[in-house]
Image: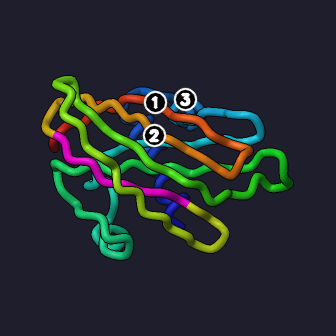
């Protein structure tokens, strides 16, 4: 359910910025047999009931980072449990350690962390992802946040 909500949000956000397909809105890094899906967005895109269910603080100054890893070597590309840690920093190099929470919903596995921001602020993310001895990599991306 949460993945469906997030993917729908990606589509809506992507279309609002003039993107014409979900493929363009998708953020993914492929490492060997694993697809690492990642995104960051304002917590206000999440409904109050979803926020309450997952302990997310909805605020114009609070974003969420969502990470999911799929094993493409297996039929159906099942999600995998990972070890995850990360930091976020703004252009002034103020660093925030990301506190990821694992969410399991049916067969889905996601990792969510909250990150504070200010209006028109670009945040750089550096996230370490490990799955046994098969996957040990970092995902780096940036996201600009705006206050509504």
Based on the displayed image, in which of its 4 quarters is residue 112 positioned? bottom left
Of the image marks 1 and 2, the number of the one nearer the N terminus:
2
Task: Kindly identify which numbered label has been placed on residue 140.
Answer: 1
C-alpha separation, residue under disc 3 versus residue under disc 2: 22 Å
Residue that appears at 62% across and 60% down: 81
C-alpha separation, residue under disc 1 versus residue under disc 2: 6 Å
Residue at the farthest front position: 133
Q: Given contact means CB atoms under 8 Å apart, are the residues at marks 1 and 2 in contact?
A: yes
Of the image marks 3 and 2, the number of the one nearer the N terminus:
3
Can residue 38 be spotted in the picture? yes
Task: Kindly identify which numbered label has been placed on residue 18.
Answer: none
Look at the image and give the residue range highlighted in magenta: 110-117
Q: Is residue 86 left or right of residue 145?
A: right
Residue 67 lies, with reference to residue 32, above or below; the image says below
Give percent across and percent down for residue 94. Answer: 18, 33
Residue that appears at 20% across and 37% down: 146
Quarter holding the C terminus is top left
Nearest the viewer among 94 and 77 is 94
Q: Which residue is mark 3?
A: 24
Question: Is residue 89 shown in magenta?
Answer: no
Of the image marks 3 and 1, the number of the one nearer the N terminus:
3
C-alpha separation, residue under disc 3 versus residue under disc 1: 18 Å
Based on the displayed image, in which of its 4 quarters is residue 22 positioned? top right
Nearest the viewer among 43 and 69 is 69
Task: Kindly identify which numbered label has been placed on residue 127.
Answer: 2
Element at badge 3? helix
Q: Given contact means CB atoms under 8 Å apart, are the residues at marks 3 and 2 in contact?
A: no
Give percent across and percent down for residue 114. Answer: 30, 54
Residue that appears at 55% across and 44% down: 129
Can residue 7 be spotted in the picture? no
């Amino acid at each position: 359910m949460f993945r469906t909500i997030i993917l729908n949000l990606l589509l809506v956000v992507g279309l609002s910025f003039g993107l014409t397909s979900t493929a363009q809105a998708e953020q993914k890094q492929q490492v060997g047999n694993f697809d690492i899906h990642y995104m960051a967005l304002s917590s206000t895109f999440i409904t109050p009931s979803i926020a309450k269910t997952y302990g997310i603080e909805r605020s114009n100054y609070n974003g969420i980072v969502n990470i999911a890893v799929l094993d493409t070597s297996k039929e159906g590309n099942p999600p995998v449990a990972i070890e995850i840690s990360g930091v976020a920093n703004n252009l002034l190099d103020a660093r925030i350690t990301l506190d990821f929470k694992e969410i399991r919903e049916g067969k889905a596995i996601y990792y969510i962390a909250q990150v504070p921001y200010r209006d028109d602020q670009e945040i750089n993310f550096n996230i370490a992802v490990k799955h046994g001895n098969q996957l040990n990599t970092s995902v780096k991306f940036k996201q600009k946040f705006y206050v509504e």
